[in-house]
Amino acid sequence: MSAVLEVTGLVAGYEPGNPIVRGASVRVPPGALVTLIGPNGAGKSTCVRAIAGLVPIAAGQVSLGDVDLTALPAYRRVEAGLAFVPQSENVFASLSVAENLALGAPRGSRAPGRARAEALLATLPEMAGLWSRPAGTLSGGQRQLLAVARALVAAPRVLVLDEPTAGLSPRVVTLLLRALRQLADEGLAVLLVEQNVRAAFTVSDQVLVLVQGAPVLTGTPAALAADPQLTALYLGGGVTA
């Protein structure tokens, strides 16, 4: 199956000549949820921020369908169909839930995306009755759910998220990941950075392991769960290339 998002040989970092991501390649087909995992400092967040156009790319290519995004600014990537949800500061705190959703499509109503976002929130008990509540008064989990919903308003082809479950309670983690799995099952391509490996494995189709900015393992959750290199990575001893 052809990929919606294809990243090939990505080299990226904040300073010229000092890359944090070294040769990462990722394919996300329609209807798939792909997760990046790895130890702290592995370059996972830098990788997805570079894909979103927020970190300079030194080499490699980022494509969305037939569109080469590599040299495009972040707002043009959004227009092409890429939605990015950062880990923090991902809602407008002084605006209500409804107003945050309204800002999800600044260049038009994007009615299908708005309907999808509202339908998602309507299924989540955490968001019941909060349409007029200022986003700054929401819990961390509610903010993340709102951030995902607002990203959907733009009717993206691919949804990219940077550690959306960080700091959330186990119950909300389960709720959020199930919502992302549902979105993938409905045909959306989803790329996720996640520190909770056990939780990520329950919803992912493919997993890519980064170590020091380079991919070292990739495969299905079932295959990686049986791979001793993954155990070595998280319990000590390192991995072999």
Image (cartoon, rainbow, N blue to C red):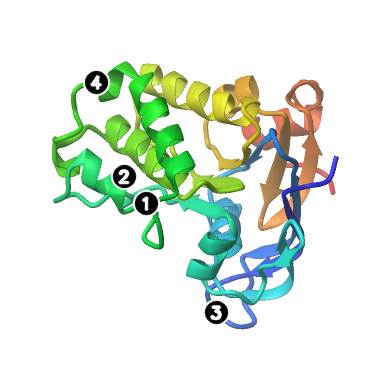
**Quadrant hosting residue 149:** top left
At mark 1, the secondary structure is loop
Above or below 49: residue 183: above
Q: Earlier in the sequence, mark 2 or mark 4?
A: 2
Labels 3 and 4 touching (C-beta < 8 A): no
Residue at the disc numbered 4? 128
Mark 1 is on which residue type? Gly
**Quadrant hosting residue 147:** top left
Query: Residue 85: percent from the left, percent from the top?
Result: 44, 49
Labels 1 and 3 touching (C-beta < 8 A): no
- Whole-angstrom CA distance, mark 2 to mark 3, is 35 Å
- Position of residue 226 in the picture relative to residue 168 (left or right): right
Mark 4 is on which residue type? Ala
In the rendered view of the protein, which quadrant contains the N terminus? Answer: top right
Q: How many marks?
A: 4
Say which mark, if any, is on residue 101: 2
Say which mark, if any, is on residue 199: none
Q: Earlier in the sequence, mark 2 or mark 3?
A: 3
Q: Residue at x 19, y 29 (%)?
A: 130
- Whole-angstrom CA distance, mark 2 to mark 4, is 15 Å
**Quadrant hosting residue 7:** bottom right
Say which mark, if any, is on residue 15: 3
Q: Residue at x 60, y 58 (%)?
A: 47
Above or below 127: residue 77: below
Labels 2 and 3 touching (C-beta < 8 A): no
- Position of residue 211 in the picture relative to residue 141 (left or right): right
Mark 2 is on which residue type? Leu
Q: Residue at x 29, y 49 (%)?
A: 102
Mark 3 is on which residue type? Glu
At mark 2, the secondary structure is helix
